[in-house]
Amino acid sequence: MGKENDKVIGEVTSGEYKYGFYSDIEIESIPKGLSEDVVRIISGKKGEPQWLLDFRLKAFRHWQTLKMPRWANLRIPDIDFQDIIYYAAPRKQNTVDGSGEIDPEIKKTFDKLGIPLEEQKHLAGVAVDAVMDSVSVKTTFKETLAEAGIIFSSFSDAVKEYPDLVKRYLGTVVPYTDNFFAALNSAVFSDGSFCYIPKGVRCPMELSTYFRINAANTGQFERTLLVADEEAYVSYLEGCTAPMRDENQLHAAVVEIIAENNAEVKYSTVQNWYPGDKEGRGGIFNFVTKRGLCRGENSKISWTQVETGSAITWKYPSCILKGDNSSGEFYSVAVTNNHQQADTGTKMIHIGRNTKSTIVSKGISAGVSQNSYRGLVKVLRNAAGARNFSQCDSLLLGDKCGAHTFPYIEVDNQTAIVEHEATTSKIGEDQIFYCNQRGISTEDAVGLIVNGYAREVINKLPMEFAVEAQKLLQISLEGSVG
Amino acid sequence: MLEIDNLWVAINGKNILKGISLNVKAGEVHAIMGPNGSGKSTLAAVLAGRDFAEVVEGSIKYMGRDLFDMAPEERSKEGLFLGFQYPIEIPGVSMVNFMKTAVNEHRRHKGLEPLSASDFLKLMRDKKELVEIDSKLANRSVNEGFSGGEKKKNEIFQMAMLEPRLAILDETDSGLDIDALRIVANGVNKLKRPDTSTIVITHYQRLLDYIVPDIVHVLYDGRIVKTAGKELAVELEAKGYEWIRNEVDRS
Ligand SMILES: Nc1ncnc2c1ncn2[C@@H]1O[C@H](COP(=O)(O)OP(=O)(O)OP(=O)(O)O)[C@@H](O)[C@H]1O
Ligand SMILES: [Mg+2]
């Protein structure tokens, strides 16, 4: 690529993170550090029942026996788990029922993020659970949804109001023994969303959770539990941002989804945590365990993710296809720029007969970033007629970044059909020039080309999110053409 | 409109264009012919601002400005259009989106508001008719899976959308069937105004029956070795390049 283009490429990738502001909100937090006492304090603050405290304590004791996983293609600096605050909450939040007044500062914060907390101002058809640091500050449309029998609330409220449901499903898809970060989350998770769609109900609006980290030195450990009963349908969205800071912050979430007979869950994420600055200072460590269980026959779980943020992403939204004829999908766009690192992908575990899975992964790397796809397709002995199709594409912008693919395939049933395709390409100088020749600047050309490349995935997102995601892709790559 | 003066261009240290001078005035149609590899596309690329070729010497003025001071996208917005010999595919980017971005960039450059969605679609419709391009092509990704001829038609469609001042058409006729050739040529003619100019790069007289040139140049080994009226194209068609070669070698 020519010198001129290199320069432009450099400029294009130096885009700014638009959500890096900090809100001066009075917070209540506990001292740094992690111990059984801290676990008890968190549980106590939430007024939790004994069974949940026990769950946390078991998880904590188990976590103490574990070591940070090092198998990912990531360079993770040592994390001092005693140097993190495990609970921080805005002091003037309204609690429990969501009817009280919210601190105007909190409202302002979410307004600035484009997430108004007043229902009348809201995009028609999207209900929001807004989580700041360790607590949910507001859940909109709760009442409207309740009329359809749908439960959509903060996790803490759900524990109080629907303890039996929470107890029945919590940890059934991601047990606390699953991995290091799942164990940590199970011990100290603070809030998140709970959602239950009863039998036969199609959720009439998009449900969403917006996660905001605001406080310094604080980790966010949220927990999301989504249950679609028989014949139910829900589309769920997740967004996230954080202030710009020089130090890293830890985000270790767990998401569990259960789909019963004929149920369908669509889970979409636009992940835009602060990625750190151009030199690689600061940014969120995003270590997330997301898994769906297609428990019922003909059930379907679909993950769509657009990952543009975080300094380090370690994330494998997966599907356990247990019910016969169930299907799982994973559509992913992961963008890394500057010093970002991502190791992301999926696991599709075929247990039931005639189970189907589709994986479409589009990695885009720029700057000196490293972008890895890691995926497992596992077909168990009884999964006769299982089918998988995987497509993993990597696009490189520049020649200092890396794209890697680690597909693992384990097939124990001879009738299964597993297909894997992979491509790696560089963004075409001729494509950029063609756009230039039509009057389109190199920045815009990169945006167009990258969005075209990712279109198959973007198209899976709900409309409003798709538009957001397209802009985000372009912004994250500003300064990167190469 | 365009004044090229003693242009020397090298690719990887090897001279490809060796002292080209060419003057194109408003309203003129110039044809450039010449054997394969003589440097026609290289000249077109330099005019459009592609940076793989190094300008060693010479100057180019476009609309009174130094062309080398203008970025490729600015040249486009100032009305310079290149119809590519090999149009580029951009998977996943719809023609509609692509053209909308381009048209609105051109408008912004002129200080105009972006077109509304409905006005834009109307413009697309009108221009599609002009070049008789299949409606379906406009809904597909830019050039992706287009046949050779469709790609060339699509270039002229884009030209119609952008209404350039100076159009450089690099072998737009190759790959077109007989009907398409006529349609495309008619399209180009309809877009002509007294203040616009066209440089047609071609190997065949056929196209020049439709787009009648005022001046025909022969580019041979990086040099313009012959310049004459439209009858030169007829002569070349009949005799090939051999006699030119002999003439050049003699001198
Ligand atoms: N990117 C490049 N790298 C190396 N050589 C090149 C490059 N582009 C063009 N050339 C060389 O420059 C010379 C002129 O090529 P150019 O494409 O301009 O010819 P042309 O007159 O357009 O030919 P044709 O009629 O076949 O289209 C050729 O010898 C070609 O091989
Ligand atoms: Mg050529």
Image: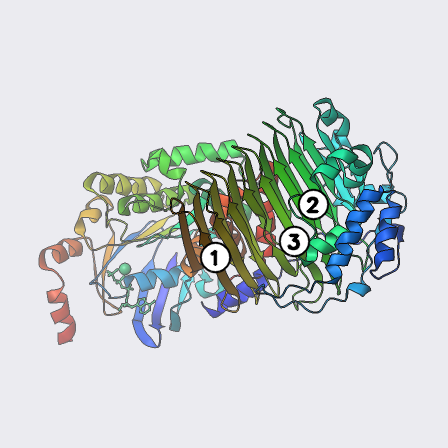
- Identify the element where label 2 is drawn: loop
Q: Bin the neighbour count of mark 3 within 10 Å (Cα to Cα): few under 14, some 14-19, many 20 and up.
A: few
Q: Are marks 2 and 1 in contact (CB under 8 Å)?
A: no
Q: Which residue is mark 2?
A: A171
Q: How is the image coloured?
A: rainbow
Q: Bin the neighbour count of mark 2 within 10 Å (Cα to Cα): few under 14, some 14-19, many 20 and up.
A: some
**Could you tell me how far apart the alpha carbons at marks 2 and 3 are, in whole angstroms?**
10 Å
Q: Which residue is mark 1?
A: A407
Q: Residue B67: which quarter of the image?
A: bottom left
Point out which mark residue A178 bears.
3
Residue A196 visible, this orientation: yes
Closer mark to the observer between disc 2 and disc 1: 2
Q: Chain of mark 2?
A: A
**Could you tell me how far apart the alpha carbons at marks 3 and 1 are, in whole angstroms?**
21 Å
Q: Amino acid at mark 1?
A: Pro
Q: Quadrant of ligand 1?
A: bottom left
Q: Amino acid at mark 2?
A: Gly
Q: Residue at x 68, y 69 (%)?
A: A77
